[in-house]
Image: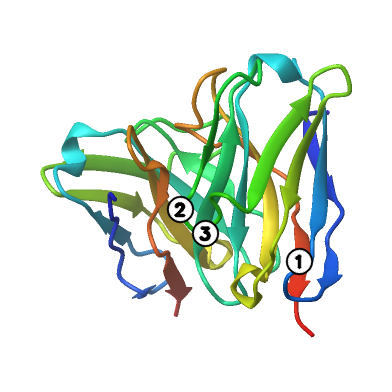
Amino acid sequence: SYVLTQPPSVSVAPGQTARVTCGGNNIGTKNVQWYQQRPGQAPILVVYNNNDRPSGIPERFSGSNSGNTATLTITRVEAGDEADYCCQVWDSRSHVVFGGGTKLTVL
Amino acid sequence: EVQLLESGGGLVQPGGSLRLSCAASGFTFYSYAMGWVRQAPGKGLEWVSLITGAGGNRYYADSVKGRFTISRDNSKNTLYLEMDSLRAEDTATYFCAKGDNGATMAVVVLWGQGTLVTVSS
């Protein structure tokens, strides 16, 4: 089955740039989605198809995907961005695959 | 308003059964694949099952195959998950999820608020 690997945690100061990575075998050949999940809440989609944003998601959120690593980048980080971030791909054999999630802490 | 509302969670003994429901509103239900994603306490997201828009194809994670059954009633805009032979490791919040097209859940565009299933004696 296809596996996505994320770091357990990332810390960043307010106003700085946060980068959350998602590793997978040739993930660059797949479309990657990113979900934000605040404590006690349902996930919400923040990036889809590698670097598209749903309506209502700030331009501060962007994504990239190449080789074996996809990256979610959050610029000008705010306290409200503190949450868990999870990557996801569609795999023809494994279907819906999620990464383990990364806790973003705003210092 | 586009929304998904789950119900049916609760406490069940190991080996027992439970049926979850998800009422959808605000979109053309039959046009979209739907599924279930769960999250054990303090853990990450785990895909459980999905069903295509017309209901013709169903897929399951290996961890639930043979024990869980997904179905939908497009006349009632409702998604179901029948869970049998429940185990302690099935304890989780179960989220109803909407795909981005009728055939796959390549993108989960909408999530319900979740319903908690606890398997314990």
B1 left or right of B96?
right
Toward the bottom, the furthest residue is B121
Discs 3, 1 touching: Cβ within 8 Å:
no
Using the numbered discs, state the Cα–Cα distance from disc 1 to disc 2 in whole angstroms: 19 Å
Looking at the rendered structure, the kind of residue marked 3 is Leu
| Picture quadrant of residue A61 | top left
**Closer to the eye: label 2 or 3:** 2
Discs 2, 3 touching: Cβ within 8 Å:
no
Give percent across and percent down for residue A31. Answer: 31, 33
Badge 3 and badge 1 in a common chain: yes
Q: Please tell me whether residue B82 is drawn above or below residue B53 in the rendered image.
A: below
Toward the left, the furthest residue is A67
Which chain does the numbered disc 1 sit on?
A: B
Which disc is residue B62 wearing? 2
Give percent across and percent down for residue A33. Answer: 40, 41
Q: Helix, strand, or loop for circle 3?
A: strand
Q: Helix, strand, or loop for circle 1?
A: strand
For image coordinates 36% across by 30% down, the residue present is A49
Q: How crowded is mark 1: few (under 14 residues within 10 Å), some or many (20 or more)?
A: many
- Residue designated by label 1: B117
Q: Which image quarter is the C terminus of chain B in?
A: bottom right
Badge 2 and badge 3 in a common chain: yes
Q: Nearer the viewer, residue A36 or B47?
A: B47
Give percent across and percent down for residue A35. Answer: 50, 49
Q: Please tell me whether residue B45 is drawn above or below residue B48 in the rendered image.
A: below
